[in-house]
Amino acid sequence: MIRRRFLATAGGLAALAARPGPARAYGDSFTAVGNTLDELRARGSAKVAWYTDFFPFSYQTADGWTGIDVDLARHVTAALGVSLQPFPFDAGETVEDDLRNVVWRGSLVDKAWANLMVHAPVDRALMARNDLVVLTGAYHVESLAVAIDPERVAGGDPSLSLLEGHRLAVEQGSIADSYLASTQGGRFAGSLTRHRRPEDAIAALRDGEADAVTGPRSQLEAWLGEARERFPLLEFPLPGLPVPRWPVGFAARINARDVATAVEEAVGSALNDGTVARIFAAHGVTHRAPEPA
């Protein structure tokens, strides 16, 4: 899931405007999906969708669902004056599939849909292509980073040249995998070791089987934990990568625009009073706030 998630997010956004729009099926009617804020408050709850198996953002433990996105969903629904009704879902092939199946149309199997989806890329081109969705409430900026073993990777100006000749661990099929395998004529392709899960790539670094790991910064931080002091994180220009940084927020149905507005206000307040930063810190991740609109 995480592999597809970041491929669609970081790699796909730059190409959105150039691709033809998807065929749309509106279901029973334009208003068949979506609830206004008054309707949610009358019902007393809101269904919030988050990705399954998406550490550190949304994942299950013996005590139930937890993670950054889960905590943020709880905070936002409380600010809206409703209780949280969890709507976990497995990622589709693209983010657009997720927006369609979760937010603006619902599942073809059971017609289920959510009032909100968390961790949606807040991108104008994406929203233009999916005009039945409002993307709002950006709360964090994600990016690709590199965790290095300083005993094996020599210092110097942070750049791709720093990685040349080193064993590079990546999650198989991720944007980091695709980028490093193809950039600069495949310069790093022979140095890659591919792992099924991001935690396996981190384990290779810890165990001395890799000299560096490339992946989304938030995940690298969370999986490294206290070992972050041993394996510093670097960010430097990645030539040819279309979207090296991307904001994430919430998605709502277009006919629930008042819900989207309320979410934007709730997230803004949570950013200003430090709530979002505290949620990220509690899960071992450095929060990076989006630039003001």
Image: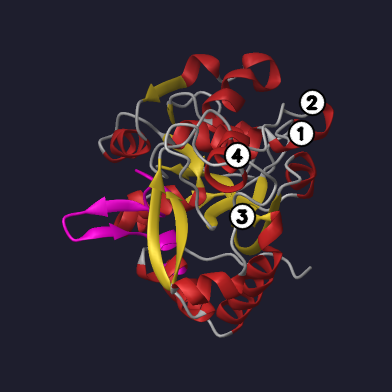
Query: Which residue range is magenta in the image?
Result: 51-72
Vertical relation: 274 (above or below) 192: below
**Of the pair 248 and 81, the residue shown nearer to us:** 81
Q: How many marks?
A: 4
Q: CA distance from mark 2 to mark 4?
A: 17 Å
Q: Earlier in the sequence, mark 3 or mark 4?
A: 4
Res 19 label = 2
Residue corresponding to mark 1: 16
Q: Amino acid at mark 4?
A: Arg
- Callout 2–callout 1 Cβ contact below 8 Å: yes
Q: Is residue 120 located in the magenta-colored stretch of the structure?
A: no
Quadrant, the N terminus: top left
Drawn side of residue 40 relative to residue 230, left or right: right
Residue neighbourhood size for the residue with mark 4, other residues' Cα within 10 Å, grouped as few (<14), some (14–19), many (≥20): many
Residue corresponding to mark 4: 100
Q: CA distance from mark 2 to mark 3?
A: 21 Å
- Callout 2–callout 4 Cβ contact below 8 Å: no
Q: CA distance from mark 3 to mark 4?
A: 11 Å
Q: CA distance from mark 2 to mark 1?
A: 6 Å
Tell us which disc is closer to us: 2 or 4.
Answer: 4
**Of the pair 235 and 50, the residue shown nearer to us:** 50
